[in-house]
Image (spheres, helix red, strand yellow):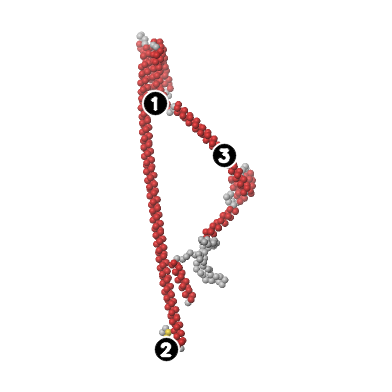
Amino acid sequence: MSITPIDKVNGHALPETSHAESWARAGIADAEAEAIRARTAAELEERRLKAEAEAEAIRLKAAEDAERMRIANERAALRLEREKATELAKIAEANRKKEAEERAAAEAREQAAAAKKAEAESQQAVESATNRWRWTAKGFYALCAAVALPVQMAAFYEPDAKYLIVAPVFIEVIALVALIGAAAAVTAGRPHWHYRLVAWAGALAAATINIVHGLDAFDEATAFGTALASIAGPGMWDLHEHGRIVRRDGRLTWRQRRAEAKAASRKAAEQAAADKKAAAQKQAEQKAAEERARTLAAQRAEHFPKVWEHAVKLAASLGETTVTEAVWKRAYNDIEGTDPSESVDIIRGRNAAARRVLAARSEAPGNTPVKATSMQHGNQMPRAQRGPARKPPVRRVGDTQKYVSAARKQASITARAASKEAQS
């Protein structure tokens, strides 16, 4: 049997048939070859698209990573700048505080030095005035003695006993020695009254002698003038020592005592007014508290009659004349089973409100509230039917977030491949 060229398909010899059958077989072979070519091209296209999708996904991921890294670096830089600015502000604030403290310390030192200088100057002025006063008193004492002694010496003069003229000097010396002893006692902080008593006794004795002898031998002016000199000298010196005694003991002057008495009287009046005001305020607060307690008792009896009735009985059984907070809390717990701030209705209402809040938070913007029973709102991809009575889920707009471009390309490739496999 002869084989014609047309009877060869894919290099194999075909049995002798009619030309129509040969042409049909050749068409089938060409169709198979075309299908193989198309499938190969589709596979190549699929691989190309898959490679492009993978490359695009890698590029997008790299871009996202780069963007994320850039944002992280910017945030780190901003955080560093913020921390740096914070530290610089803290350092500046610390420096300002340090400078302020140093200025305050310098001002305090200057004020202390000025106060110390002023105190030293005041002390020096006081000491200078005291010394001047002391020497002036001594000079005045000597002058008065010189004025008073001649009359006293004339009173004791006797031609046969001239030594008696020493007696007036002795009397003046007694007063002088006693005053010097009083000054020493004041300086040492010892009792001084007896020294001053002896000095005044001597001064009065000399003044008496001057008056008696002056009126007898001279005139009244001489008598009373010399008597005044006998008293004025020791008296002026004793006045000086009296000032030292007052300064040593810290006794107040009459003006100071009067000012303190006025201040004490004013303070007592202010304290009495404050006490009266406090008593009135306390009385008003007590009255307001009683009014609030009556109002609260009326409100509790109106809104919680069962609890109030039980609270009154409980207070009587516990020996209380009124329903105290402890009694009310216990009675409320006995009736309602909770603290006064809670109740069964309140707890149920709170739970219902919490459920409504959860439902409101689970809904998407623009959609109606949906009861969320699972973290996944719906199937991501269609699934095959699992029974005659069940249908595959239907995708709706807004069920899931949109895919990125690379994922969309990969999904398109997968869908086309699945469709081609189903057709073949």
Q: Which circle, 2 or 1, is nearer the viewer?
A: 2
The span from disc 3 to disc 1 (Cα, nearest Å) is 61 Å
Closer to us: 384 or 221: 221
Across and down, in percent, residue 354 comes to: 55, 56
Asked if 420 appears above or below 298 in the picture, the reply is below
Q: Quadrant of residue 51?
A: bottom left
Residue 5's x, y, as percent? Answer: 41, 87
Q: Mark 3 or mark 1: which is in front?
A: 3
For mark 2, give the secondary structure: loop
On the question of residue 239 being in view, the answer is: yes
In the rendered structure, the answer to whether residue 307 lies left or right of residue 131 reads right
What whole-number distance in Å separates the C-alpha atoms at marks 2 and 3? 133 Å
Q: Residue at x 39, y 58 (%)?
A: 73
Picture quadrant where residue 178 is located = top left
| Mark count | 3
Residue drawn at (37%, 36%), measured in percent from left and top? 111
The quadrant of the picture occupied by the N terminus is bottom left
Image marks 2 and 3: residues in contact by CB distance under 8 Å? no
Q: Nearer the N terminus, badge 3 or badge 1? A: 1
Taking 317 as reference, is 269 above or below it? above
Residue 61: image location, x then y, percent: 41, 64
Residue to which mark 1 is pinned: 187
Q: Which amino acid type corresponds to the residue marked 3 in the rendered image? A: Ala
Which amino acid type corresponds to the residue marked 2 in the rendered image?
Ile
Tag 3: Cα neighbours inside 10 Å, few (<14), some, or many (≥20)? few
The image shows residue 285, relative to residue 382, as above or below, that is above
Disc marking residue 284: 3
From the image, tell me which residue sits under label 2. 3
In the depicted view, which residue is nearer to us: 161 or 390?
Answer: 390
Identify residue type, mark 1. Thr
